Image (cartoon, grey):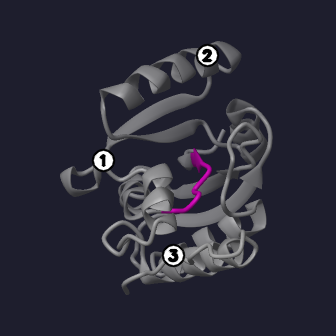
Amino acid sequence: MSDRRLGVYPGTFDPITYGHLDIIQRARRLVDHLIIGVSVSAGKDTLLSLDERVAIVNEELAELDGDGDATTEVRPFDTLLVAFAASVGANIVIRGLRAVSDFEYEFQMTGMNARLDPNVETVFLMATEKHQFIASKLVKEIGRLGGDITSFVSPNVGRHLERRFARRAAGAAPGAQAARYIY
């Protein structure tokens, strides 16, 4: 077995936020190679397609690759997390926590994953104070309603969301107003 530490950071990343990027940067200090697993998440109503989410995460990671930490790659997946981890040779799963409510859910998932594959360890990283409240679901709602999302996502992600909301507004009922963004 290799001494190389290979980790997986899974999520839907719909959209990827500054909170996600914070966890990615910190996780890269713990592993030699980090795979960002973009989940299909059939149970969630995603705003962005899987291909869009993978492309956007790749765009965001392009800025990080030269900083001397672990290498990263982005891969979509539609299997159980432990199956995905095994398929890429990872034995570490990185999860970000924002609040106690996150911990309760993650605690249950970690127990189930440990039962499914005891060789996979879960490492929890607490969100930094300035990112603890950021949730993709809230970012989408604020953006959809025309609020300023610039402190939650990068300008690149903001532009992707703006285009998506504009397309949705164009297909909306007559008189529907498109969301406005401040960048």
Disc 3 element: loop
Residue behind mark 1: 127
Query: Against 151, is 42 above or below?
Result: above
CB under 8 Å between discs 1 and 3 = no
N-terminal label among 1 and 2:
2
Query: Against 171, is 183 above or below?
Result: below
Q: Residue at x 45, y 75 (%)?
A: 64
N-terminal label among 1 and 3:
1
Q: Residue at x 48, y 54 (%)?
A: 136
Residue 61 magenta-highlighted: no
Query: Against 4, is 57 above or below?
Result: below
> Type of residue at label 1?
Ala
Residue 106: image x %, image y %? 47, 26
Disc 2 element: helix
Q: Residue at x 30, y 47 (%)?
A: 127
Residue behind mark 3: 179
Quarter holding residue 28: bottom left
Residue behind mark 2: 112
> Type of residue at label 3?
Ala
CB under 8 Å between discs 2 and 3 = no
